[in-house]
Image (cartoon, rainbow, N blue to C red):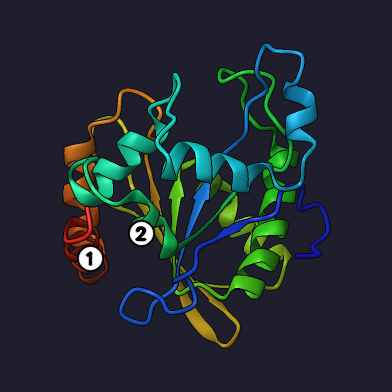
Amino acid sequence: MDIKNLKWQPYVGLNYQKGINGRKVLIVGESHYLGNDENSIEKHNNPLFTQIVINELAINRYYWNTKIFPNFHRALIGNDSFNAELLWSYFSFYNFIQRPMESNKSRPTENDFEIAWQVFFNVAKNLNPDLCIFIGTSSSNFLGYQAEKNNIELKELKWLKKIGNTYPRKAIISLNKKEMELHFIKHTSQYFSWYKWNEHLTNEIPNELEYLKKTVANNG
């Protein structure tokens, strides 16, 4: 995928184009983080690094010290005992911020978010999802301005009922002559009440989650 400022190529599952009941789902992570080992910079310079991460951490469940994917799995399915390879075959995934953070305590700059939204609009034009789930809510703070700046029609942007200390957000944009839903949830790394967010997502995208639960549970 040849897109300006896109550092890492998205992961695209085998069933992504088929969709979930015909709806294509793009998962948007937040950032990659540099590790302490000497090979970390070299790994992060690999344009296929995101695909490697999904295969290792999300599909094969080599979670190491991160809770991002087990928590995300539970937020979707309600548990982490299912066929992860089948689940991820229905998704595409890429990370929003287009440079690695120095550590998991580092935060993206306003310029990072500006570049990230420009890249997202082009990735979305290419992958043409119907539904996007953002892991993290910070990016939504810049959506209104960046949609206007990039001539993207923002049809809706609202904050929903607070969960813990985080407001979920929902947006609808017009892209590729259709409406795309964007759902923003709390970052799943830590202090994440997955059962509350599972309840939230079940309310927001019930048909997709019901389909996934039945499909991956029957093939666990």
Above or below residue 111? Residue 5 is: below
The structure residue drawn at horizontal position 24% and vertical position 42%, both measured from the top left corner, is 74
Residue 164 in picture, x, y percent from top left: 23, 31
Residue 128 in picture, x, y percent from top left: 56, 76
Above or below residue 10? Residue 18 is: below
**Which corner quadrant of the image does residue 172 belong to?**
bottom left
Mark 2–mark 1 CB contact (< 8 Å): yes
Left or right: residue 166 versus residue 54 is left
Please state which of residues 82 and 36 is positioned toward the viewer in this rendering. 82
**Which residue in the protein does label 2 denote?**
86
Above or below residue 104? Residue 25 is: below
The structure residue drawn at horizontal position 24% and vertical position 40%, both measured from the top left corner, is 80
Left or right: residue 102 versus residue 184 is right
**Which residue in the protein does label 1 denote?**
215
Q: How far apart are marks 2 and 1 (CA)?
A: 8 Å
Amino acid under disc 1:
Thr
- Residue 157 visible in the snapshot: no
Residue 17 in picture, x, y percent from top left: 49, 77
Residue placed furthest toward the bottom: 177
Please state which of residues 60 and 180 is positioned toward the viewer in this rendering. 60
Residue 35 in picture, x, y percent from top left: 65, 18
